[in-house]
Image (cartoon, grey):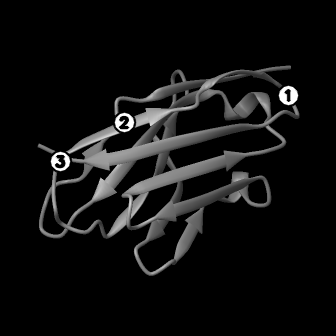
Amino acid sequence: QVQLVESGGGLVQAGGSLRLSCAASGTIFSINTMGWYRQAPGKQRERVAGMTSNGRINYVDSVLGRFTISRDNAKNTVDLQMNSLKSEDTAVYYCYADYPKQPRYWGQGTQVTVSS
């Protein structure tokens, strides 16, 4: 049974930083893509950043230059360093993992609140 466990959310003032971490466990198969989505109250879930196993990265435009995704393929972990946080970054952040020929797996979500 695949599990994704997230950590690192919390409350921070605007301009501050947080680091989210996610660890996947429960299978021997390699993960194709890992990354993060977020969902703010009343809004649709949006993909924030994703990273393939060979290092290809995508970010949503609104976080370019502020967020950095990193990944350890050997440990099946993915981190999201979030700097210069804004109130509009407030959301529940969800880690995801895409395995070959399997449905996407999701973490339980971690709350990030940025106070202005």
Residue 58, by quadrant, is: bottom right
Given contact means CB atoms under 8 Å apart, are the residues at marks 2 and 1 in contact? no
Name above or below for residue 79 compared with residue 89.
below
Residue at x 58% of width, y 31% of height: 8
Q: CA distance from mark 1 to mark 3?
A: 37 Å
Name above or below for residue 103 compared with residue 45.
below
Given contact means CB atoms under 8 Å apart, are the residues at marks 1 and 3 in contact? no
Q: Residue 60: x and y, percent?
A: 61, 57
- Quadrant the C terminus occupies: top right
Name above or below for residue 22 compared with residue 90.
below
The mark closer to the camera, 1 or 3, is 3
Q: Residue 49: x and y, percent?
A: 55, 57
Mark identifier at residue 61: none
Mark identifier at residue 26: 3
> Does residue 81 appear in the picture of this structure?
yes
Which numbered disc, 2 or 3, marks the residue that appears first in the sequence? Answer: 2
At mark 2, the secondary structure is strand
- Quadrant the N terminus occupies: top left
At mark 1, the secondary structure is loop
Q: Which residue is mark 1?
A: 14
At mark 3, the secondary structure is loop
Q: Which residue is mark 2?
A: 5
In the displayed structure, does residue 100 sit left or right of residue 115? left
Amino acid, disc 2? Val
> Does residue 44 appear in the picture of this structure?
no
